[in-house]
Each structure stands twice: as structure tokens, then as C-alpha cells.
């Protein structure tokens, strides 16, 4: 029997992707959808400006949207997928956890809290053990798990393969990010047609901190962050979906392109329902990966890497992931699947 | 009396910009235009697919296009502006120099030859002294001067200000380049709409070598290249004009943002006809510079810088220049003006 | 001595263009700028998100933004250029007129009121005589003049030439409109990248009514609208500026392409300051006009026409105008110049 | 056992779509792929610049590309899907038919020949009976069947529903066409970013003729074309896939919006393998259909209609179809399925 799931922030860009992923999901069943006050009480079909290029799932379209408040969630809901604005998530998510709900959240609040697991299941599933500490410290029956920012997720799998193989000292990353990363109305057309914006408020800092936590090690009492220097510069460009990134790494040990390709290609996948068969797809054509051509690999859950070259201090490469699938909704769902597999649900 | 100028490769994207700049220029007069065999003999108006958003200058439209061969250039031409494909420039430019023409070239051939000045007039006008060596060694009456690749020019003025102020050790640069940099047919629409391409063949290498030559010092016998590590990653994005770049530098000495801003803002301009009043425009809004909004500053001849921040090893910043103006046609014209001022014409 | 001008709605996309046009204008001097309550009291530089690709004029940047209320306008202002949202214009503009201000408005309210002149000066300057009726009926010292919607203006000059030459019976028009027509935040990037929207709320109706009023005749007591059937379909596409339109007309008399070209090319221009030297630019290349290449002709104040062909019932053609220049801010300024020339100021 | 299929012109944009559709197809098996001389002899994987956002099918990638010549086609091939340039198709297709091959062609040559069926299976399958006449007249063992131009296909299904219901007198259509319709290199990025092109050479005429043939009636000796006036204006816009069209029709009988919706929604589908469950999807939201959101309905084989309104002479509506699926490769495959069902294979 599927686990009953609630979606908080269900009308936004990531919320729509959550619906697209969860409606046909064999392990979860969408039992409740919430949104802001102005949508509450409407049918989901009428409340959401549906913008995915497939029709709205029939059953979900008929659900009544609830207010995003803990008391509005039905009792038989076991897990909540949250894509709330961080200012809302900050207040609502802890209340939900207090009331006993398991929350898999894509919101940016609390991601670097010491007792909150920030997980990409294939990379650092062990960090989930933080939940013991979290529950004890916060006196929660529920639990709060976060997935990282979309631009962070994109580079973490190849970096994890490198950290395992040769150690990381310094990471410099420049991003070319799609407009969907800012939500449906985040970037106006006049801002971005024939243009690029060399700054995304807060994003650089998220990449610099979240990546170090994700690549850190859990020692039984907490996560020791990766001891490496990370510097990011984030750019918005006129693409719909798919974040592309140029990455330079100084490595601890020497490295060859062939060894790197092998380390990435053989990075162990999980067999969770949404996990791709191969986590990192490595291209040899230096023109790839490209957002429009490669973002949909393995239902948008793979990370694509190309342009691997040796440098004086280590190597450089490019990577790409679908920012609202692997980078947001898919990441939350995958965390939900991990929580289920590990018995939290 | 204006100097008679020829334009080789006059029908291409850069050739059209050369015409746009030279036709109203007080120091030069367009006396001849050349193109490939298929255009030769036609009126320029009929040979060129004019793509600038201003009408084709009346007089130039009526000129007969000549074949790109040294014998076809009229004797009264004194300077030739070349935007030939490098494979053609490689053969034709030396022949023109042998016959006595002064050639200001935007083509990529010969840029790193030890006896060929690669100049951005505001930055390294002194390198022009290489012409003595060039003429002696090659037994030329004419002379060959190059301007760098458009993506190199964009970052060199701010880097020159930094090199003067605090010394450069390591430069990492990621570019977001406009489609016009590849010429009129260089990037198809299917390649770039809703997309980005993380590689531009040869461009990374040009940035890594040309920047070190440009920032090097002339010691009376040749140019000693800047002793710094330069690593570039070049991306094509869906913008028409204007290359945007994210730059990280490790500096020799410590540096503050305020000192950097001052060094850039006070970088000495030239008073050549096409040189901007202020070479580097420094923005404080972190969202700027942006290609569509800032590429046209000072008739497309200024370089815009923003997002200056301190890092562990030095600093990072973003820069932008109009790739077919400051980065190509305008660069060649400026070199022509320098040659004129220094008495080579 | 220049006429003192106020700009209502000065921070929006059209307001910014008004500033760009009026600041260097020899006949007007910007004396006051107004915006919504949230901007009032700030320096214009801080209140406006300036998005024109030229720096903000120094003097205007320092002006203090006033609330959009009649009492806030200084007494020495003689003319007000209004680009208010129509819901605001509906209330504020009549009050301004009552207080004695001459208002040249781009807002859509009141455009089809029988006693309000809707003018494109080159086409129907005579309609200004409606002001006598307006002042008498409304007991105003001031006066209200409107320019039409940007998509209407684009097709009206070539249609006026045709109406004069052969008479119009039926007009069918399909538009490809730029995003700036919806204001700075009117179209999100997720709506329009790799996309088009086949409907612009209210726009089709505006084209159908305003064009008939504009092409109508003033008979001393009012404007008799053109007796023709007009049907429009309006589309938004991913262009920044410039509305392109496909037009079919059934004409009363027979017509030849050559006669049409002549009628359009010789359509009499005005010698107002902002009026183009030639109102209608006729292209013979069927690929033209194109938004990016042709919108800036004559400082964005010309209308470009191409693709003229005979059909069974008359002819078809394509036309283009810069929607925020000829189609909005420039149209309002031109109406201001006409009011000045005719002694209303 | 599947029918052996050859693909002529297999490396182009439509050829790639043919491979995408035929490789998993239960009724056909790709047995040979041909392309121009420069590709012949290479593995398909090396010859094609694969640009579909899914990996190249493994088996097809290993096929050796053959020259596009009748003698190069293996004997066991039964049907050939042709997406050759029309200049090549004109010569090669008749030779193939002479040698006994059944050819389902997307090329524009011969579409209006009186003895060549131009079919959209759901609309005019009966026209296939022309093959009797064709074989007799041309003395062919094989047969040549055409699908129409992509912009024609888009409007024909809704027009067919209208013709059946109320009769058509006059059709005016304006198109907003995607760049993929011009093939991989047909439109450069400099032509189309922030731009639109109001003319597509030959396309207007194709729409005007092909639609009348398609909607004509077969009387046992030939097709009597629809007696209606059709006028088209074709525009290229910056979309990747999906042609959007504004259509006005003058109808013979009166018509209501509700009756039209019903006629379109109930237009009888076929049960061929690639035929959509519902041929015409009717939207009530006037903002739809939109290319990016609606082109993929029913695997890109449905036609979407919206904005239906009554007019003085009949009605207007907007329609959309995926131009390389329903409009090209899918159309050819569907014709192949029809040929198979009717016993020609």
C-alpha cells in the first residue's frame, strides 16, 4: 500500500514537478496539496497555472487545495514533500515535524543546520543518521530532511567521485543556470532575452557551503564538512531547464582523465525507484553536455559530465543536471524513497 | 586628408562592422573592399547580406567588391583592415605586408608570433616597437599588427589594471559568449535556442596564450609573456552581441575591493579617435554588467566590470565587452589609429 | 524657452522611454516625474529599475519622484505625458485636465470616447479639433489627447496611405508582438522562451476599434469611424522590441503593387521635431522588415513595410514599428509636439 | 514480421525523427539508411550530428550509411521513407518507384501532381486510390505517396472538420513557425534571436495549394481540389519545434463556436499505430495552444486548437502541431501505416 503524501507549495514550478513525479509513483499517493491563502479552497486545476508540457493529472486536478498550515494536513498523511518559499518553510516545516510528519524538503531554510541531514542519496545516504540527533535535540516525532540547491546538486556527484579517488583541495565553479530555477515568475522576459545576468542572490553562498556539507563525513556525532576552498559565480541565461556548470578542481593527488572518467562512470548507483541506472553520464564529445539535449537523460535524474581535461593543479570539467528534476522535485522524491527504504516511514 | 583604407573580408560580420566604423571615420576613407571569389565583381550592396540594424552606407554600397588578392588592391591604399578567415589571412596578409601595406588584422593567424605586435592600444602600445624587429627579420616594407581574440580583449583591460596594482599569479575564466563571435552562420538556431554549448574550439587556448602575451613586457628585443597560469572555459549562449566573463585571480600582493575599483576606474585612457573616455566602467550593482544593457557603452568600446569581491587568494569579478566592436572591428580600427598616431602611416 | 513637462508613470518601461526622448528634447524640459506610492519621495535613480541600454540621464536621476496625484504636480508644468496604468489613468487624467493641464496620454482609457482625439499626427492631426468639443462638454481648461495602442499604430500609416489611394473594405491582421509591449514584468521568461502566446487580452479589440477611429473622418461635430471590417489576432513572441504584423486588405478599388509602394513612400511626413523624414519605409526584399534589424529606423519613429503582394480581393503586406518608441513614448511626445505647434501650449 | 524499411535522407532533422519513430515501431524495421555522398560508408553514429534529446538508438548507430541511389537499397526493403531535399527527391523517388519500392515521402516535390496521393490519413485516406491511376500511367510496380508540408498539416485537420460541418469559402492564415522546419542549419542564430522573419520562401504557396488538394474530393478519376480561396503569410520565430497558426475562415453556412468545438472534438480518429486517440485537442483557455507546452500531445501527433471565435464571415481560431512529428516524420510514418493496412505492403 502506497504511503500517503502531502505536497506543500504545490502550485509553484517545483510543486508541479512533484505532482508529475508522485502521481504515477508506486510507493507514494498524493493525499493532500497545499498552497498560499489565495489558492486555498479552489480545485488544484483552478488554482495552479499548470506549465508542464503534459496535461495535469486528472485526479490531482480535482483535489481541493488546502492552506499551508499544519492543522490542515489530514492525519493519514505520512510524508510531506515541501517546496515552500524558505521564509514560509522556516516556520511551517518545524511545526510539521513537531506534529510527527516526516518532511522531505526542497526549501533552502535549515540546510546547513548541524542536525539536519542534507542528502543526495547516492552520495551521502549515511548522513541520514543525523536524524537520531535531530529528534533527540528537538524532541520531534517527525523528521526534517533537506536536499541541496539545484546548482549544488549538479556538481556534487562528479565531485564526490573525485573526492573518493584523489581528494579535493579547491573548487572553482561558474554556472549557466536556467530560468526555471527562479520559479515561474522569477525572471522576466525583458531581463533575459538576448541577455545574461552574472549574479543570483544567495546562490553563490549556497554552492560554497552546501557542497562542503554534502561531501563531508558523518562521524557518529555530526558531519565534518569537506575541508576545501569552494568559490562559485552564478549566472542566469536564457534556457528553460538544465543548469550547466564549468568546474575547476585542484586535487590532492595526481589524476588522469582516464582515471577520472572511470571513477565517474562507476560511481555506485542506488536502486531506489527514481535513482538513475547510471548516476554520472560521461561524454567524450567536448561540445556536450548541453542543456536542451542532455537534461532529460534518465527521466532528468542523471548528471551529465563532459570536457574533462587535466590542468596544472588537477582538472576541469563541465557538468549538467535538470534543475527542477534532479535538482529539486526529483531530489526531494529520492530523499523520500530513501527515508522509506530505511524504515522512517 | 584621410588615409585610404582597404577592407579584406568586407562582407562578413566583422567586415560589416568595419564598414560601419570606417565610413564616418575622420582619419580613414574606405577605398577598396575585398571578399571571396563568389562576391568579386558585384556591388557591395549585392554581395553582402547586410545584417547591421542601420542602413548600409550609401557610398560603400556602390563599391565593387574585389577578389582578396594583393594585386587587386589599388596602389593608393595605405592601410588594410583584415577580417579574413585565418586560413586565408595566413597566406594573404604576409604578401600584403611584403608589397608594402600596413595591415591591421583581426584574423587569428600569427597572433603569437614573436615578431608580431598583438596590441590593445590602451594596454600595451609599446609592443608596437616589435615592428622594427618584424621588418628587419621579414624584409617587409609594410607591417602586420594584430588585435587579440574577442574573448581575450574582454578581460585584458581589468587584468592589466590588476597586474599594475598587485601582480597576477593565476587566472581562471569562464565565458558566456554571444553568437556573433562565430560569424554570421557560425551557430545555427537549432544549436542555441533554449541551450548553451560548453566549448568553443580553439578559443580556450587563445585566451590562455594571447592574454599572457598582451600582459607581457617588451624589453627591446621581444615580449616576455606574463608568468601566470591562465585557465579558460568558453561557453556559447543565446545572446546576439556581448561577451560576459567570470574571472578569478590569485594576486601576488593583497588587495581590497576599493583599491581594485580605483585601479580600474583610473586606468589611463588614450585619446585616439575610437578610444573610450573611460576604458573600464565599474558597476556596483552585482547584477551588472549584462550583455544587452551594457555592451553599447561608449559606442561599444568600453569594457564593463562588476561583481568585484575578495576571495581567499585574491579576487573575482565579472567583465563584459561588445565582441564585434571592442572585441573585433573596433579593436582593429583602434590599432589603425595607433599606427597613424605613431607615424607608421 | 522649453515647455515644462511632467511625466506620470515615469518608472515603467514607457516612462523610461519618455525620459530618454524628453531629456534631450529642445521643446520640452522634464520638470516633474511621478510614480506609485512606493516610489514617491525617492530619487528617480533609486526608484526606477532603469532598463534602457544607455545610462540614465544625470539630471533626471536626481529628481525626486512625486506621488501620481494632481496636487503633487508643480504649477509651472504645462504638459503632462502620461503612461499610467489605464485603471489609474481613468481617474487621474480627467482630474489633471480639470486643473488645466494638457495631457498627452499613452494609457488605454478613454481612447474611443467620442470627444477625445486619438491621434497619430501624420495621419489624422485634424482630429485635434475635437478638443473644442471636449472642453466645452467637460468644462475643462486643460485637454486630453490620446495616442493609440502600439499594435494599432504599427499598421495605421500604411493603411492610411491605402485608404487615401484605393479605399478599405476589410482588414485582417495577425501580430507578432515584442515582450516590452507588456511592460517590464508583463511576460515571464518561462512563458516565452522557445514559445509563443496566441492571445493578448484586450489587444485584439483595441486594434479593431482604434484603427477605425484613427482612419475615420472629422466632420466638424465628431469623428465618423472608418466603415470597414477589422479582425485581429495578437500573438506574443520572444522579441524584445518591435511589433511585426501580417496584414490583408480587401480594397474598394483595384490596386497594383507599384501604386501601393508609391502611395506609401510618398505619404506626406510632418516636420515636427520627432517625426521621421519618411513615415513609411518600403522594402523590396520579402524577408524584411524584421524586428531586430528594422525597429530602430529614424530613431524608432518610422514604420517599415514589406512583402507587398496582390491578392484576389486587394493586397497583403507586412509592417513593423518600434512598439515603445513609435508605438508608445514617441507617439505621446509627437502628440505633444503637435499640441505645441497648434498653439495649445 | 515487421516490414523492412529504408530511410532516405536519414541524417537530417526529419531523418533523425524517422529513426526515433521507426526503431521502436512494431510494424517496421529499419533495414537501410542513406545520405549524401559525404556520409556514405560511415557508421550512422559518425555520419549524423544527432540532435534529438534522447540517445541515438544503439542498433541504428551501428548501421553503415549508404549513398542515396536506388541500386544501393537492399532487395529485402519493402518501403522507403524519404526526407530527401526536393531537388534530390525529384530524381531519386521516381527511380525507386520504378524499381518497385513503395515510397512514403516528406519531400516537397510532386505533391501537387494529379496522380500522386497527398494524404493525411485521418482526413483523406480515400485519395490513396489515386495509386491505381499512378501505377497505370507511370508503369510503376512501386508507388509514391506524399504527406504535405508541415505548416499545411497543422491547419488541415480543423479545417477538414469545418468543411464537413459548414463548408469553407475563404481561408486566411498567418503562421509562427519553429526553426526546425528549416532543417538543422536552415536558420542561423543571428537571423532569429530577438527577431522574426516575415517570409519563408515557397511556404506560402505550398499552404495555398496543398490544403486545397488535401481537402478536395476523389471522384474515381482524380482529386477535385477544394474550391476556396486560401491566402497564407508565413513567419519564422525563435521556437525550436511546433508551428502555431492564426486562421480565419469564411464559411458557407452559419456556425457557432459550440458546434465547431464539437465538430473538431469528434472528428473521427483512425486506429493506425501512430494516430492519436483524439486528432484535434480543443482548448478553452484563449492563451492556448502554445508551442512549448502543447506540441508534444499524444507523442506529437495531435493537433491543438484554441481561441475559437465567431466573426462577421465565419470564425477564427488558432492551431498548433509539432512540425517534425505530426508535420513531417510522423506524417510519413502514418502514411506508411496506412499503406500497410490497405494492403500495399
Image (cartoon, coloured by chain):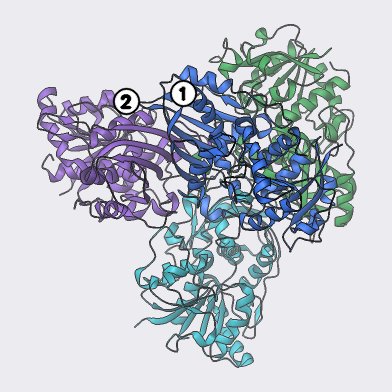
Chain colours: A blue, B purple, C cyan, D green
Where on the picture, by quarter, is residue C271?
A: bottom left
In depth, the one of D180 and B226 nearer the eye is B226
Q: Nearer the viewer, mark 2 or mark 1?
A: 1
* Left or right: where A105 falls relative to B82: right
Marks 2 and 1 on same chain: no
Q: Which residue is mark 2?
A: B88
In the image, residue D29 sits, relative to residue B109, either above or below, namely above
Q: Which residue is mark 1?
A: A166
Q: Which structural element holds mark 1?
A: helix
Residue D264 in the image, given as x and y percentages of width and height: 86, 46
* Left or right: where D263 falls relative to A256: right
Read off the chain for label 1: A
In the image, residue A244 sits, relative to residue D99, either above or below, namely below
Count neighbours of disc 2 (C-alpha within 10 A) and say few if under 14, some if 14 to 19, many if 20 or more. Answer: some
Residue drawn at 45 percent across, 57 percent down: C296
Where on the picture, by quarter, is residue D250?
A: bottom right
Measure how far apart labels 2 and 1 are at the Cα level. 46 Å
In depth, the one of A193 and B344 nearer the eye is A193
Amino acid at each position: 500500500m502506497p504511503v500517503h503524501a502531502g505536497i506543500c507549495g504545490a502550485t509553484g514550478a517545483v510543486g508541479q514537478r512533484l505532482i508529475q513525479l508522485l502521481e504515477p509513483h508506486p510507493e507514494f499517493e498524493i493525499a493532500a496539496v497545499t498552497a498560499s491563502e489565495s489558492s486555498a479552497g479552489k480545485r488544484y486545476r483552478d488554482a495552479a497555472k499548470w506549465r508542464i508540457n503534459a496535461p495535469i493529472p486528472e485526479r490531482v486536478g480535482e483535489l481541493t487545495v488546502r492552506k499551508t498550515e499544519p492543522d490542515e494536513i489530514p492525519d493519514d498523511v505520512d510524508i510531506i514533500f515541501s517546496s515552500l518559499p524558505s521564509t514560509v518553510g522556516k516556520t511551517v516545516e518545524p511545526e510539521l515535524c513537531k506534529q510527527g510528519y516526516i518532511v522531505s524538503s526542497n526549501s533552502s531554510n535549515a540546510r546547513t543546520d548541524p542536525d539536519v541531514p542534507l542528502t543526495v542519496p547516492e552520495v551521502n545516504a549515511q548522513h541520514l543518521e543525523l536524524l537520531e540527533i535531530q529528534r533527540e535535540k528537538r524532541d520531534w516525532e517527525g523528521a526534517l530532511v533537506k536536499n541541496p540547491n539545484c546548482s549544488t546538486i549538479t556538481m556534487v556527484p562528479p565531485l564526490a567521485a573525485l573526492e573518493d579517488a584523489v581528494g579535493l583541495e579547491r573548487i572553482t565553479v561558474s554556472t549557466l543556470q536556467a530560468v526555471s530555477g527562479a520559479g515561474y515568475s522569477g525572471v522576466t522576459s525583458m531581463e533575459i532575452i538576448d541577455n545574461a545576468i552574472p549574479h543570483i542572490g544567495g546562490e553563490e553562498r549556497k554552492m560554497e557551503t552546501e557542497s562542503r556539507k554534502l561531501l563531508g563525513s558523518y562521524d557518529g556525532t555530526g558531519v565534518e564538512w569537506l575541508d576545501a576552498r569552494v568559490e562559485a559565480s552564478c549566472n542566469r541565461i536564457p534556457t528553460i531547464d538544465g543548469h550547466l556548470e564549468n568546474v575547476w578542481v585542484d586535487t590532492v593527488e595526481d589524476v588522469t582523465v582516464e582515471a577520472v572518467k572511470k571513477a565517474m562512470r562507476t560511481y555506485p548507483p542506488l536502486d531506489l525507484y527514481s535513482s538513475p541506472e547510471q548516476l554520472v553520464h560521461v561524454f567524450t564529445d567536448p561540445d556536450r553536455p548541453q542543456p536542451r539535449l542532455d537534461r532529460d537523460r534518465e527521466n532528468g535524474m542523471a548528471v551529465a559530465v563532459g570536457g574533462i581535461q587535466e590542468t596544472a593543479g588537477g582538472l576541469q570539467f563541465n557538468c549538467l543536471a535538470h534543475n527542477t528534476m534532479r535538482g529539486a522535485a526529483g531530489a526531494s522524491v529520492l530523499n523520500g524513497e530513501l527515508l522509506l527504504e530505511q524504515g522512517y516511514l
